[in-house]
Amino acid sequence: MYKIKTYNKIAKSCLDVFDDKYTIGDEVENADGAIVRSASLHDTEFPETLKAIARAGAGTNNIPIDRCSESGIVVFNTPGANANAVKELVLAGLLMSSRRVVSGIEWAKTLKGNGDEVGKMVEKGKSAFAGPEIKGKTLGVIGLGAIGVMVANAANHLGMTVFGYDPYLSVKSAWNLNHNAVYINDINEIFSKCDYITVHVPLTDSTKNLINAEAIAKMKNGVRILNFSRAGLVESTAIKAALESGKVASYVTDFPTDDILDVDGIIAIPHLGASTPESEDNCASMAAKELIDYIENGNIVNSVNLPEITMPRSGKHRVCVIHKNIPNMLTAITGVIAGAGVNIENLLNKSRGDYAYTMLDIGSADTDKVAAEIGAIEGIIKVRVI
């Protein structure tokens, strides 16, 4: 039996993925795996039994990645599972940034009580909320992951000229990107060329305040900026100053902070990007499948702290080793197997930054002894035999 601890209410589609080998719930102790949505785990003490944490969503800021890596806990996310939901809200934000729909609706509410005069008042006052069409305009997409590519393709179909920037563009994203999109190698070209700019990158030390006063100064006058990724990507002080000067026409974000609420020109949406039943189901079921494949087979797919590695099962036992990415580790590990007189039927080793992962399929062996000897090697973090 395996145990899965939940840190948030998890969609039923996730629970249905687990079979009767699993016990799942928020009261589970000594768990083998964990599933979390938005709950912060930074102050959570993890049991030694914990092998993996799956985040039902893309961002993992709520998980102590470094601590997990040091403890040999694999951290998964679910990239692309909520991409369509976010894409749809970005498109809504794109339109709202142009057509002043939100402020128009709020103004219309003030007409309540004027009876038959409302129609005339609407016709007289509507010009204050006029805005440009997006067709024929230029959109800059910063970050061409699952969401960015879908936004770029949809905007292209809506008649926009799309420029995309991503220094880490994956082959998969490149294949999925509409051929009409123009790939830009310098982010400053996005700033200077685009009428609308939308940001779809993770929040890291290198991307914090990506949109700041210096970046805004390079943009077109009247640019419209969208941020559906993380609040910290856009420097709010710079945005407010640019709105006041007219440099920026509007700013739409899915991440409200106290200092931008009730600021004219800012549309602050209460983090609704992935708030659809379809998205929650997709994220939860993907997270469950990632945990199951790792717990039962040792395969790692969509990890944020360890290399992606999958291998068909071929031996009687599978030895899974998380270790430091240092010289001679593979020689030391295979030396233990050879010393036990056991044949290695298949082997795969990959690294990611300071950490590496090795899977070995072996024949019959005293697996407790093998695991203990491998675990005693300097630089080994965690060993388990499936």
Image (cartoon, rainbow, N blue to C red):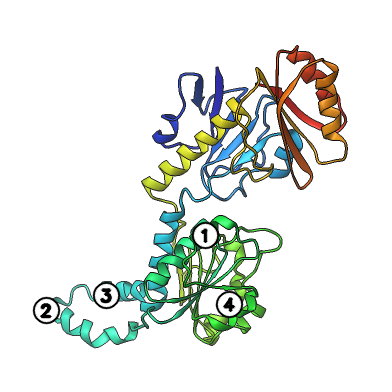
- Residue position marked by numbered label 4 in the rendering: 190
Asked if disc 4 and disc 2 are in contact, CB closer than 8 Å, the reply is: no
For the point 55% across and 50% down, which residue is it? 58
Mark 4 or mark 3: whose residue is earlier in sequence: 3
Q: Secondary structure at mark 1?
A: helix
Task: Classify 10 Å Cα crowding around label 4: few (below 14), some (14-19), many (20 and above).
Answer: many
Disc sitting over residue 321 in the figure: none
Please provide percent x and percent y for residue 118: 17, 79
How many residues crowd mark 3 within 10 Å: few (<14), some (14–19), many (20+)?
some
User: Which residue type carries mark 4?
Assistant: Ile
Q: Is residue 153 left or right of residue 307?
A: left
Camera-side mark, 2 or 1: 1
Depth check, mark 1 against mark 4: the one in front is 1
Q: Secondary structure at mark 3?
A: helix
> What is the spatial separation of the Cα atoms under label 4 and label 3, in whole angstroms?
36 Å
Q: Earlier in the sequence, mark 1 or mark 3?
A: 3
**Residue 263 versus residue 21 in the image, above or below:** below
Q: Which one is in front, 249 or 191?
A: 191
Q: Are marks 2 and 1 in contact (CB under 8 Å)?
A: no
For the residue pair 105 and 46, the one nearer the viewer reads as 46
Closer to the chain start, of discs 2 and 3, is 3
Q: Is residue 255 visible?
A: no
Name the element at disc 2: helix
Q: Which mark identifies residue 116?
A: 2
* Label annotation for residue 108: 3
Residue 123 in view, yes or no: yes
How far apart in space, not on screen, are marks 4 and 2 (Cα)?
Answer: 48 Å
